[in-house]
Image (cartoon, rainbow, N blue to C red):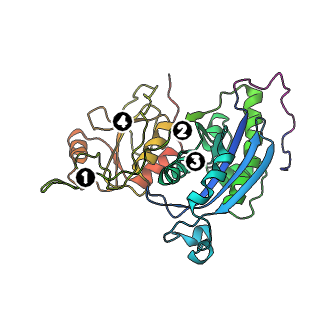
Amino acid sequence: MLEDRTTAVPSPTAWPAAYPHGYAVVDVETTGLARDDRIISAAVYRLDGRGEVEDHWYTLVNPERDPGPVWIHGLTSEVLEGAPLFQDIAEEFATRLEGRVLVAHNAVFDWQMIAREYARAKSEAPVRQRLCTIALSKVLELPLPNHKLESLAAHFGVVQQRAHHALDDARVLAEAFRPSLRAAAESGIRLPLHECRPLTEWWEPPAPRIGQQATGGYGGYRPGSWRPSRKRPACPYPNPGRYEEGKRLKQGMRVAFSGDTSVERELLEDRATEAGLHVSTSLSRLTSLLVTNDPESGTSKVVKARQYGTPVVDEAAFGQLLGDVEPASEP
């Protein structure tokens, strides 16, 4: 049982009726950030509707490939060799998630990784909504120096024991989520819930004809890539204009992406959408910012950005800007 660090629990009559009845606080460690990376460990803390811990679960997962940044997660090939494959733990994992809101720190990443693994296993994760604790901390206006898990933990006096270990990260997040949930309930705040839609099954596009680019006609997806089965919602904020160097991004700004990124494109777009930005598939005079790691390339978006004088930043700079987006002045 986690230590109670809050002073008062909202009475049953004060608890918002619209709040979920259960949560699954999740952390996964992975071989990397790309769409073809794999989960190597997973942990789930199941909480009831008021954030009280019901149980927890942890497993290693054999990724059937190189484990990636061992210096971060500490899981070597030798450690993972005898671990179960994802399809072997998929059913147990699903029982931990079913009927609950998935809670994670940067929830869109954990959800994308989980959804892909289930798609590989020709199944779907039983998750319909997710809640990002970064978004919740912003809604609560917590005085955090940044949006790292350790900062959220320190704010609530939670002690981390093994950073980047899925079980301990999930424990820390569960302990920090409970007072966050209660603070939101006491203030009558609407939780920042987002819909989770499963990804489509693994697919193989036909071989390109002679003279046709390998990615032609497939929206830039590589063979054997994942395609999201969702339509992105419209941005609710007006466009405040172009981004100015040295200043903050503002909700409603139109952002376009061009070229390869180290973090998968869908993940970056989801992060931008959750921050209140308008993700655009094309570039026009109304575009506020172009994100590209190759500003010297001849892609149509880069060429148009030069013509229109559209500001350009790389992926790393964009990631920093996403951490502190200015709220829109009007809905």
Going from N to C along the chain, the mark reached first, 4 or 2, is 2
Q: Which residue shows up at 28% across the image and 54% down it?
A: 295
Q: Is residue 251 visible?
A: yes
What separation in Å lies between label 4 and label 1 (alpha carbons)? Answer: 40 Å
Around disc 3, counting alpha carbons within 10 Å, would you say few (fewer than 14), some (14 to 19), or many (20 or more)? some
View extreme (bottom): residue: 78
Q: Main secondary structure of the magenta part?
A: loop
Q: Which residue is mark 3?
A: 106
Q: Which residue shows up at 42% across the image and 25% down it?
A: 238
Q: Which residue is mark 1?
A: 206
State if disc 2 and disc 1 touch (CB < 8 Å): no
Q: Which residue is mark 4?
A: 242
* Disc number for residue 196: 2
In the picture provided, is 101 more to the left or to the right than 56? left
Residue 99 position in % (x across, y down) = 67, 37
Residue 87 position in % (x across, y down) = 56, 57
Q: Quadrant of residue 227?
A: top left
**Which region is colored magenta?**
7-18
Around disc 1, counting alpha carbons within 10 Å, would you say few (fewer than 14), some (14 to 19), or many (20 or more)? few
State if disc 3 and disc 4 touch (CB < 8 Å): no
* Residue type, mark 4 in image: Arg
What separation in Å lies between label 1 and label 3 (alpha carbons)? Answer: 35 Å
Q: Secondary structure at mark 1?
A: loop
Q: Secondary structure at mark 2?
A: loop
Going from N to C along the chain, the mark reached first, 4 or 1, is 1
* Residue type, mark 2 in image: Cys
What separation in Å lies between label 4 and label 3 (alpha carbons)? Answer: 26 Å
